[in-house]
Amino acid sequence: MRSLPVWALVALFLPPSFAQHGYTPGDVQDGEGLFIGNCAICHGPEGDAVPGVELARGKFKHASSDEELSQIIKNGIPGTAMPPGNFRGHELTALIAYLRSMSAAPPETVVLGNAARGKAIFEGKGQCLNCHRVSANGSYVGPELSDIGVARRAAQLERSILEPDAEILPENRSFRVVTQNGMEVTGRLFNLDTFTVQMMDSREQLRSFVKKDLKEFGFVKKSPMPSYRGKLSSEEVADVVAYLVTLRGGNRQ
């Protein structure tokens, strides 16, 4: 059975009391993006990086009600590392909806392996640096992974390795153009305006096309990343995930 992102699980499993607060799966999806972009740097993508706080279990030090959570998000906590947040209106609602969903949705348990072995697989057998970049090593063809441990939860990383088509972030979609003479180019989109397309192809070459000279152009539905199901053992996948969650941008160059 294909794993679902957190916001999709909300629609399937959350109790009626969740909906009574006025939260929707769309709120949770928006909140997940806000949390990863603003909160995960300290709390971690699993919500357990701050001692005594386990967001995925609904365990907070200074709040219990949604109103208390809202005040903490807006005002911070004096004398602690929790700063005030510049969130208003729907953003506050979305963040609280996501925090509540982390503890209400069924847990996604991932067994982590050995990070050192995972790094060796990532750089060797997996050939991941052929497309991805970590710090100063690797390619720009695929998404940079130098801080992927902050941006993605372990279950999401495992899913990306085994089912890369299951959830493709908008910024990671591939773009494809076909010229009038039938030449096809696929790569990462940099810019798409009224008249032109700029992209990086699979050989890391910057390419620019005039739209009127193209027969076809558009986003590719599937991920360019291959599935490693059957290519790596379950132990090797666990090792790679363990390595990826350690990548938090500390050595980015």
Image (cartoon, rainbow, N blue to C red):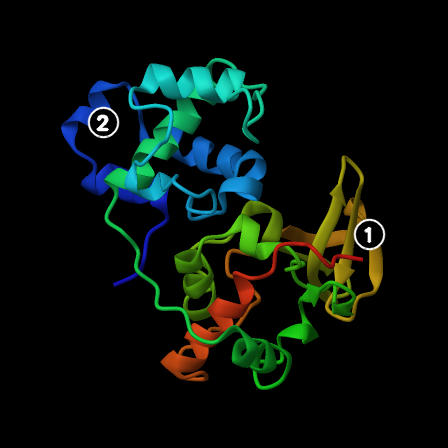
Looking at the picture, which amino acid does disc 1 mark? Answer: Phe
Q: Quadrant of the N terminus?
A: bottom left
> What residue is shown at x 30% (from left), y 36% (from top)?
58
> Which disc is residue 240 wearing?
none
Q: Would you call the spot at circle 1 few (<14 residues within 10 Å), some (14-19), or many (20 or more)?
A: some
**Is residue 79 visible in the rendered structure shown here?**
yes
**Residue 60 location, x and y as percent?**
35, 32
Which numbered disc, 2 or 1, marks the residue that appears first in the sequence? 2
Q: Residue, x 43% and y 28% (percent of image)?
A: 95
Identify the residue at horizontal 44%, vertical 15% (top origin): 71
The image shows residue 190 at horizontal and vertical percentages of 75, 48
Q: Quadrant of the C terminus?
A: bottom right
Query: Helix or strand or loop: what does disc 1 sit on?
Result: strand
Quarter occupied by residue 235: bottom left
Q: Disc 2 to disc 1, how far (Cα)?
A: 48 Å
Give the numbered dot on residue 209: 1
Single out the residue that lies furthest toward the front.
Answer: 79
Q: Nearer the viewer, residue 55 or 168?
A: 55
Q: Would you call the spot at circle 2 few (<14 residues within 10 Å), some (14-19), or many (20 or more)?
A: some
Relative horizontal placement of residue 145, taking residue 152 as reference (left or right): right
State the residue at coordinates (45%, 37%).
32
Residue 144 in which image quadrant:
bottom right
Residue 182 seen in the figure: no
Cβ atoms at labels 2 and 1 below 8 Å apart: no
Q: Which residue is mark 2?
A: 18
Task: Answer with left or right where residue 56 lies relative to residue 30.
Answer: left
Amino acid type of the residue tagged 2 in the rendering: Phe
As drawn, is 150 to the left or to the right of 207?
left
Label 2 residue SS: helix
